Amino acid sequence: MRRLLVVEDEPEIRALLYNHLTNEGFEVDLVEDGVRAVSSFEPGVYDLVLLDIMLPKIDGFTVCEVIKKRSDVPVMFLSALSDDKSQIKGYDLMADDYVTKPFSMPVLIRKINALLRRSEGSKPEEDNSIRYEDIVIDPDTMEVLVGGREVELTSKEFDLLVTMVRNPGRVYSRELLLDLLWDYNALVDDRIVDCHIKNLRHKLGGDYIETVRGRGYRIGKKGI
């Protein structure tokens, strides 16, 4: 869940933002002045800061400057100051967007989502690979490497492999694999599982998949 820090001193606007943003699935922390904004902000905690400018104690321009020195988190100004000078100053302080009051809540939410998408797109991609011994699986591209060799799998073979590799050592009965991966409502011959396992074994090579007599199949006993 994406977490936002909302800095707004007007109670009505603060409540409005909280209600709409939480309804959109965001986790929202509220603060009402610049000092609390600076003390509440921690790098890596928030995905976006929504920041008023005319705040008690420390103004939003100063808060933005402090935050940008500590983090590259997106900052969106939300202010009644609509003059060019204020907006230019905001952007000069590395603000990522500037929305003037009064504002449209649906438009604001779309701007927030767009800014989050841009921010996430600029981050290095995470390695979501699943690994077992010398098997490397990319769940996003469905690419499978075995000892550095690319292996072409059907979608069902891929699903079987991922299911077992995520829980190395667990024994999967034919019936359980049918329920998990085939999602049939009618009775199905469980020999279809045996057929896919046979093909998967052939493509992987080695002795990765073990038959547990009278119980089903498992992939190894130790995962990475």
Image (tube, helix red, strand yellow):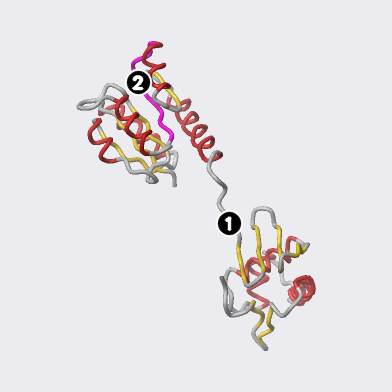
Mark 1 and mark 2 in contact? Answer it, CB < 8 Å.
Answer: no
Three-letter amino acid code at the position of disc 1: Asn
| Magenta residue span | 74-83
222 above or below 182?
A: below
Q: Which of the two discs, 1 and 2, labels the residue nearer the N terminus? A: 2
Indicate the quadrant where residue 70 lies. Answer: top left
Residue situated furthest front in the rendering: 69
Q: Is residue 79 magenta?
A: yes
Residue depicted at x 79% and y 74%: 202
Three-letter amino acid code at the position of disc 2: Ser
Q: Is residue 20 left or right of residue 12?
A: right
Residue situated furthest left in the rendering: 57
Query: What's the mark number on residue 79?
Result: 2
**Pointer 1: residues within 10 angstroms few (<14), some, or many (20+)?**
few
Indicate the quadrant where residue 175 lies. Answer: bottom right
Q: Mark 1 sits on what residue? A: 128
Task: Pinpoint residue 58: horizontal percent, then vertical percent.
Answer: 23, 27
Q: Nearer the viewer, residue 147 or 131?
A: 147
Q: Nearer the viewer, residue 183 or 42?
A: 42
Indicate the quadrant where residue 215 lies. Answer: bottom right
